[in-house]
Image (tube, rainbow, N blue to C red):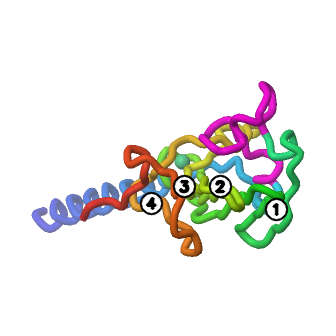
């Protein structure tokens, strides 16, 4: 009788533990509205430039959202890296991470955006969190400065980094 009771308790505990594991598996599933392939082209076509600060701002008219609206086509596309280079500006988009960075259940992209005036002093390099919130959504900047990532300076550029202290992305203090 005693052995039966112990067995019952053991089985109950086991069932409890197993159900906990299956719950954990369920909640860790992420939804993604990002394409499985040709991510770089998707970024070129659907990155919404109005959702984060960049040097293209002053040149934009209302309704202009994408690089194509600005008359820009990529001059270089490689895996996880897209470059737009004009006579005066250099824009580089690098995919740093592709995962649910902010743990809201939707897959994100951490993108390092380099915004550099060729021959000028304007240079910003930020890491942004981008996300598509629905199937039809553009790629929008949901937040920037995710902890653990911080702005980097172009090693070839000794001055002209324009990143206010309040906006700098600093690593998490350990
Ligand atoms: Ca997310």
Q: Are marks 3 and 2 in contact (CB under 8 Å)?
A: yes
Nearer the observer: mark 3 or 2; the answer is: 2
Q: Is residue 93 magenta?
A: no
Spatial separation of the CA atoms under disc 1 and disc 4: 27 Å
Magenta-drawn segment: 42-65
Discs 1/2, front: 2
**Comes first in the chain, label 1 or label 4:** 1
Question: Which of the 4 image quarters holds residue 83?
Answer: bottom right
Quickly name the residue at label 3. Answer: 126
Taking the image as shown, residue 135 lies to the left or right of residue 5, namely right
- Which residue lies under the disc numbered 4? 150
Whether the residues at callouts 1 and 2 have beta carbons within 8 Å, the answer is no
Mark 3 to mark 2 CA distance (whole Å): 9 Å
Residue 8: % across, % down: 23, 59
The disc, 4 or 3, on the residue closer to the chain's N-terminal end is 3
| Residue 174 point in image, percent of width and height | 24, 64
In the rendered structure, find residue 115 and report the number of the disc placed on it: 2
- Cβ atoms under marks 4 and 3 closer than 8 Å: no
Q: Secondary structure at mark 4?
A: loop
Q: Secondary structure at mark 3?
A: strand
Q: Nearer the viewer, residue 73 or 13?
A: 73
Q: Quadrant of the N terminus?
A: bottom left
**SS of the residue at dot 2?**
strand
Q: Is residue 64 magenta?
A: yes
The answer to whether residue 135 is left or right of residue 121 is: right
Residue at point 48%, 59% (across, down): 151
- Above or below residue 47? Residue 86 is below
Q: Are marks 4 and 2 in contact (CB under 8 Å)?
A: no
| Residue 48 visible here | yes
The 10 Å Cα crowd at callout 1, few under 14, some 14 to 19, many 20 or more, is: few
Q: Position of residue 148 (x, y in %)?
A: 40, 61
């Amino acid at each position: 009788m005693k052995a039966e009771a112990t067995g019952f308790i053991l089985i109950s505990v086991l069932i409890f533990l197993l159900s906990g594991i299956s719950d954990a598996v369920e909640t860790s599933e992420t939804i993604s509205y990002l394409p499985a392939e040709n991510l770089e082209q998707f970024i070129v076509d659907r990155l919404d430039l109005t959702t984060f600060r960049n040097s293209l701002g002053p040149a934009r008219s209302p309704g202009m959202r994408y690089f194509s609206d600005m008359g820009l086509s990529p001059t270089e596309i490689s895996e996880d890296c897209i470059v737009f280079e004009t006579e005066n500006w250099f824009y580089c988009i690098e995919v740093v991470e592709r995962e649910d960075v902010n743990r809201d259940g939707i897959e994100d992209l951490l993108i390092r955006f380099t915004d550099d005036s060729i021959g000028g002093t304007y240079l910003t390099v930020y890491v942004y969190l981008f996300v598509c919130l629905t199937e039809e959504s553009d790629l929008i900047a949901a937040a920037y400065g995710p902890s653990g990532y911080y702005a980097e300076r172009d090693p070839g550029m000794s001055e002209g980094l324009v990143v206010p202290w309040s906006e700098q992305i600093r690593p998490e203090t350990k």
